[in-house]
Amino acid sequence: MQTASESKTSYPIIIATVLLFVMLSVAGWLKWRFESDRAACLMNQRNIQQAMRSYQGINGLSEGAPLDRAWIVSEVFNGIEPCCPSGSIYTWSPSVPAIGTLVAPCPHGKHEFDPGTTKDW
Ligand SMILES: [Zn+2]
């Protein structure tokens, strides 16, 4: 049987355990949120690149030709320009980029593809 003083000494342990659980939960949620935003951003960049290459192919454009960003956004994305989930704004190239160069990379430092992944895009 516990005495009153033994019961009081267990409160700090319970509080510390609950705080530890809360801290781990918040850290896990932040990591999940970061990876979720990164994955959505990479998909946006891929979709923009794919739309640009389709536009290039349809119009028979070569590297360096001017790019009609408004047409791509209007026709491919129904007028809603894709944006990074973390709030960064994609910087579109004004012209058709070389193979392997992204047309609208994300300025967020952690939203980059792994090296070599986009070499034939
Ligand atoms: Zn991004």
Image (cartoon, rainbow, N blue to C red):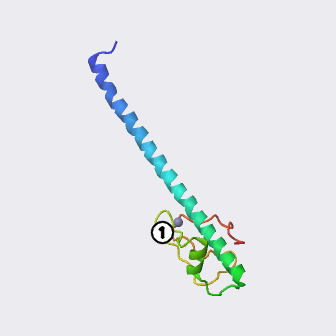
Instruction: Say left or right for 28 vs 51.
Output: left
Disc 1 crowd rating (10 Å Cα; few below 14, some 14-19, many 20+) is some
Instruction: Identify the residue shown where x is 32% and y is 28%.
Output: 11
Nearer to us in this view, 54 or 38? 54
- The quarter of the displayed image where residue 36 is located: bottom right
Residue that appears at 52% across and 59% down: 37
Q: Is residue 29 above or below residue 115?
A: above
Q: Secondary structure at mark 1?
A: loop
Residue drawn at x 49%, y 63% is: 85
Is residue 53 rendered to the left or right of residue 30?
right
Q: Indicate whether 25 appears above or below 97.
A: above
Q: Quadrant of the N terminus?
A: top left
**Circle 1 sits on which residue?**
88
Three-letter residue code for mark 1: Ser
Residue 35, position as x, y percentages in the image: 54, 55
Residue at the bottom extreme? 65
Give the total number of marks visible in the rendering.
Answer: 1
Q: Is mark 1 within 8 Å of ligand 1?
A: yes
Q: Position of residue 111 (x, y in %)?
A: 55, 64
Quadrant location, the C terminus: bottom right
Q: Describe residue 43's horizontal placement relative to residue 61 as left or right.
A: left
Q: Position of residue 14 (x, y in %)?
A: 36, 30
